[in-house]
Image (spheres, grey):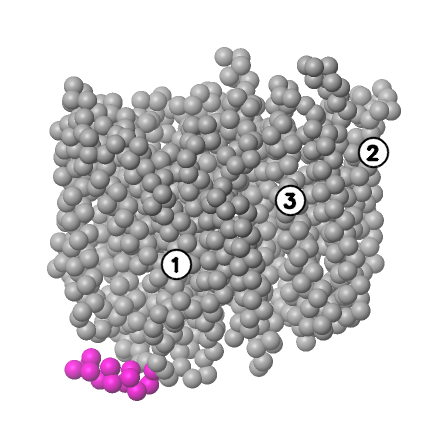
Amino acid sequence: MATTALDQRAHAASHAEPTGLWSWITTVDHKRIGILYGSTAFLFFLMGGIEALMLRIQLGTPNNTFLAPETYNQLFTMHGTTMIFLAIMPISAAFFNFMIPLQIGARDVAFPRLNAFSYWVFLAGGLFLNSSFLFGAAPDQGWFGYANLTSRQYSPGLNVDFWMLGLQILGVASLAAAVNFFVTIVNLRAPGMKLMRMPMFTWMSFITQVLLLLAFPVITVALILLMFDRFFGTHFFVPSGGGDPLLWQHMFWIFGHPEVYILILPAFGVVSEILPVFSRKPLFGYAAMVFSGVFIAFLGFGVWAHHMFATGMGPLPDTFFSLATMLIAIPTGVKIFNWLGTAWGGSLQFKTPMYFALAFIAMFIIGGLSGVMHASPPADLQQTDTYFVVAHFHYVMFGGSIFGLTAGAYYWWPKMFGRLLDEGLGKVHFWLMLIGFNLTFFPMHILGLNGMPRRVYTYPEVLGFETLNRIETVGSFILAFSFLIFLINIIKTWRGPRNAPADPWNGATLEWAIPSPPQEWNFAQIPAVHGRDTLWEEKRARGGKLPEPPRVSGQGIHLPNPSYWPLVSALGLLGLMVGVILEPHIGPWGIITGGVILLFGVFNWAFEPAG
Amino acid sequence: MSDHAAAAHPETATGLDSRKLAIWTFIGSECLFFATLISNYLVHKETWLSGPGPFPHEVWKSPAGQVFEPIIEIPLVTLGTAVLLFSSLFVVLALASAQRGNRRGLLTWLAATLLCGFFFVGMQVYEFTHFVHKGLTLKTNLFGASFFVLTGFHGTHVTIGVIWLLTLWILALRGKLPAEKSLNLEIAALYWHFVDVVWVVIFPVVYLIK
Amino acid sequence: MDAHGSQPAAAEHAHPSSGLYVKIGLVLFVLTALEVGLYEFTYGEHSGATGHALQPFFVPLLLALSAAKFALVAMFYMHLKQDSRLFSGVFVFPLIIATVVILALIALEAYHFAFARGG
């Protein structure tokens, strides 16, 4: 059987990839870093999910006392913060890491050690944020941290400090990664891989990096100003000192709106890869997909105050932002029509990735429609701060991003791990997730329009909210159960043989041209690219299928050396922030120690031979 | 092909060095950082209308009858601005020397750059202390808070630049900055020029516009 | 061997001479002096009637002078004029977004304060 022969050849020819904890701590290999991101993010996702289940238990019954109001506030803040910063973004990062170099025909990213640094800083940020639970002071001000609830006066505890500093740590990780992937995509493409020949996942990821680079500095400054308010007694957002809480909202949403495109564009990219492969048809309207993505990103900087229609900005700003928001629906609509156009007339392969990709389209349409409804200020005045908004963003972020990224997980699992996830379990996961998701979030549209406010820890019986809330709670447990099925699938697959072929789906892009999982150096020879859907081109030229790529010895291929300085630097940064939180108890010594370790790490990193 | 040569002549899709592209990308991102700080300053500098003094350009009389003179010293800041601009010239000359393999020129011009950098930071420290003595602190009013945060973060960026250039100067002193490695200086110089260019915006906005 | 450390094939023209750099340095110094001079002329202790008449034009004139300094440093000292246009793009695009953000925040906050007080 081919498997045994392949295994034998693999053992004979391949240079053994290092194993063991140290090799993972010092890795600078984008594939390993991708796996680190993905597994860490998945754990945080499960945490965020448990937080959500607790919220749903509390809300399942009116006047419930399962959670105290303060606990409820901490859980919904951490749920949102976790899902956005510790789950969706790093799962996207996992795919950026693993797939972008493969898709553009490169051996690694432009700056492998910076890549490792980004991961360790992300881990540090996630641990820092969640360590707040140990102090009984988890962030409780909402993921958006509106001023002046966040001022020292109204939030005297450590909660907001953890949130503020934790997000700064995560911002460093995101910025470093964004520089890295931007340069990688611009500079490390294989010969012939022109920009308009790049796979759509790489394109959407490229646009995401630009958004990260431009949006994160804004929230960095906003958090700095908040820090000065809380630690040094300034009044940037404090009305009694002349400050304006609305300035926080502007700054936050100038970041926050591009942030939601950061959250969705990678999923757009994933789905734009899966639909063509599983329809056996090229993506409909490639150029339109690229330009609509660029347009969405650019315009995304002009719509932020649609989160502020109820703050009394005045008719002129309201009108401007309303029009801009409606305008942004157009390029999004273009994408949806192009996805449908891709599937239309195709030879549809109903495998698990395709199920999730098709559901993505349906769920995202629903989320997009409720979004367009928000675009009208008078309508939004009724919808804002109600469960209607909660429905909207869960449809786009879960129905959109999570469904899309789950599709990506099933699609790319064989490439990353050399094993195909079980189709049967995959379909069970899918149906339970689809049903659970819709049961949980669809009724929220109705509850919202009937007046149930968001961010409330309970509600009285007379308002008639209980039936739908109970249905939502049941739905959330079905949703949770679906992820249990996913876990079982992962474990079952892990125990099985590592026998996935290089190209199980008949893919169009370069990652399918190399063994599953790839060898350390990715490509034995850097490929030459002759067109879009480059692998389909090659298969056509060679008359159908390609032979299974052999595992080779990798002699003569030079790879960057592993390094622990990225980890040391990340620990220094973490130490610095821990020092800030503990400053009332230990004075400046934590900050100084952290700073010294950071400098030590960075200097050694700079002078280490890159290899 | 040696590692150094490979690093100096990367085969990239654009033909451009990845590290140079990286510093430009970072600079692009920093534009948004300073834009937000500058916006914050512009929004808040007006609120002194209701707050306590002292103020930059105006004479102000407190409710208690105390008279505060305007506290900025335009001559000193102008000198600092000029010094920072000249430091950009010096670092460009240092880079040109480095690219030609002229070690003496590199050391001289880079030292000149560093002296300018030290002077600028010193001027800022003096200015901050002077303001505090005159009664303007972070907490006094929003003008003070916004001023110190904006110029303070700019000053921090200058300090980081000084440390970076100083490291390169020490390397050059030990003969470890030959022409093939001049890109290292070019990247640091780009960061330095950016910090200068941010000051080109801050100087009129903060010091000359009332 | 190209001492700049980049591919000879890249679109890089000959670098300006040291003399040109020094001349630009002097121009920058003069522009700075003009900025301060404009301030003194318009708002200074010894400003006269002409100076006061100039006040509505002060900010645009001042910003034009600093824009000129900005452009000179960017184009010549940072080599954008000679280097690949990709670098200019990577710098200018964020600058545009940055300008939009500054103008938007000023406008919104001014409108907010006016609207809030005016009712």
In the image, are marks 2 and 3 on the same chain?
A: no
User: Mark 2 against mark 3, which lies toward the viewer?
Assistant: 3
Q: What element carries label 3?
A: helix
Query: Which residue is labeled 2 in the image?
Result: C37
The location of residue A584, given as percent across then percent down, is 49, 41
Q: How crowded is mark 1: few (under 14 residues within 10 Å), some or many (20 or more)?
A: many
Q: Farthest top residue?
A: C119
In the image, are marks 1 and 3 on the same chain?
A: no
> Disc 2 is attached to a residue of which chain?
C
Residue ID at (60%, 76%): B4
Please tell me the numbered disc located at residue B154.
3
Q: What element carries label 2?
A: helix
Q: In this view, does B118 lie to the left or right of A409?
A: right
Residue ID at (30%, 71%): A517
Dot 2 amino acid type: Gly
Q: In this view, does A185 lie above or below B103?
A: above
Distance between mark 1 and mark 3 Cα atoms: 33 Å
Dot 1 amino acid type: Phe
Query: Which residue is labeled 1 in the image?
Result: A96
Range of residues picked out in magenta: A1-14
User: Mark 1 against mark 3, which lies toward the viewer?
Assistant: 3
Position of the C terminus of chain B, as image quadrant, is top right
For residue A393, say whether it is visible.
no
